[in-house]
Each structure stands twice: as C-alpha cells, then as structure tokens.
Image (cartoon, rainbow, N blue to C red):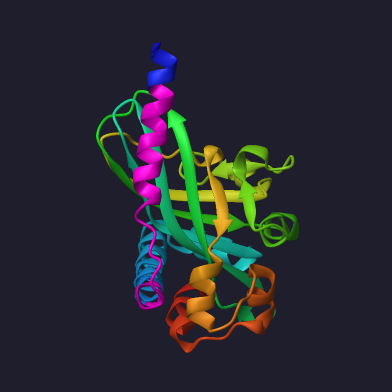
Amino acid sequence: MNRRSLLACAGMFAMLTLVGCTSANPGEEQADNRSLIAKAITTVDAMKGSGGAKTTALLDKAKGVVIFPNLVKGGAVVGASRGQGVLLAHGPHGWSDPAFYEATSLSVGLQLGGEESSVVMFLMDQQALDSLLKSSSYSLKASGGMAMADYNTANQQQLAGADIIVWSKSKGAYGGLTVSGSDISQRFDLDQAFYGQPLNAAEITAGAGKNAEANPLRAALSR
C-alpha cells in the first residue's frame, strides 16, 4: 500500500472512531443538549472576555451565530475533527432558540497530538444565515462566494467586508483551526430531543421551537 493510501485509511479510521461517539439514546441526547448549551455559554463569556466591546458589537450586528464549544482534532499526520454546536438567529426581538449542529472535517498536514478548539462563527448578513438554514448540510469549502475572515488575524477592513467572521481559541500542540475545510450538518435527533417534535433549523429559528433551557444562552448573547 502506498503512502497516499495509508494516509487515507488513517484519516478514515480517525473519522470513524469519532463518529462512533455519537449518542443514540434520547435520555443521553437531552443530557448532551444541556451540557452543550452550558459549554456554549462558557464560550460566549470567554469570547466577550477576550474581545470586549468589539465582539459585543459583532453580535449586535450579526444575523446569526454558530457556536462550537469543543471542536476536537486527533491524529498524528492525518487529522479528523468533530464537534457539536448550536446555531441561533438574531432578529428584531432578540436571539432565537438554538438549532443543534455538528461539524466534521478531514485534513492532511503536519499535525501533532490533539487539539480542542472553541469556535464562534458570526453570520453577518442574511445570505450567510440563509446558507445554513436552507440546507441540512453545509460545506464551508464551497461557501458560494461569501467572504470569510479570521477575527484573530483580520484587519478592520477585512472584518467589515466579511459575510462570516470566525473567532476561535485553541489548545494543544497545533495552533489554529482549518475552518474552511469543515462540513456543518443539522442534528435532527438532538433538535427533536430538545423540542419534543421534529423541526428543522429554519423552523426553530423562526420560533416554532421553544425551550426555556435555552434562555441562559440567549441571555449570554444579549448582555
């Protein structure tokens, strides 16, 4: 087997190992939802703590936000990453309840050890929000000509012209996250466990889904 085949097999093994961690028990899903919301609040607070008024201003302007509190990478040469997150839309009456999402990616590079990243994606215009709401699976590799900016490195002009702004904080041996290689998919099972009925992200963010357990996260984004 040649080197390329070995890398591909290693990547698939890493991804399948992470995929196997997905919960299938409704009770476990509800617990996962509560844990994810609590971690999302911690991520928002950390982001505001580091970014101050700048990140608060972005939240005020954003049409929506996607929060991945724990996006985890693993592998030595071929790295697979996976994480659960939430999407909330921002309208005249404040932040919606969350739709649950999952991010997966497969990347090849000089990666050492493991990494855990917190990621917040600001969806700065309606096009960016609709791109996620109109499909149950969205690839940032094919973002339809939308401009993306890294909050940590972009200048003010780049941030002002971006459709999607990505804030991230990483821990581990390799610094940074290749967000552009990620696929984002709605977790309908987690949505149903949280709201007690089958709903898609567009329905949830339009107000069809209501759960008081999301109120602390909505408040964290608003304060």
Which residue is rendered at x = 69% and y = 45% of the image?
Answer: 161
* Type of secondary structure dominating the magenta stretch: helix
Instruction: Answer left or right for 101 relative to 206.
Output: left
Asked if residue 142 is positioned above or below residue 89 in the image, the reply reads above
The magenta stretch spans residue 95: no
The magenta stretch spans residue 14: yes
Q: Quadrant of residue 28?
A: bottom left
Please state which of residues 144 and 209 is positioned toward the viewer in this rendering: 209
Tell me residue 89's x, y (percent): 63, 70
The magenta region covers 7-30
Tell me residue 141's x, y (percent): 62, 38
Tell me residue 27's x, y (percent): 36, 78
Asked if residue 216 is positioned above or below residue 171 in the image, the reply reads below
Please state which of residues 124 and 66 is positioned toward the viewer in this rendering: 66
Q: Quadrant of residue 91?
A: bottom right
Decide if residue 93 is in sight here.
Answer: no
Please state which of residues 78 and 39 is positioned toward the viewer in this rendering: 78
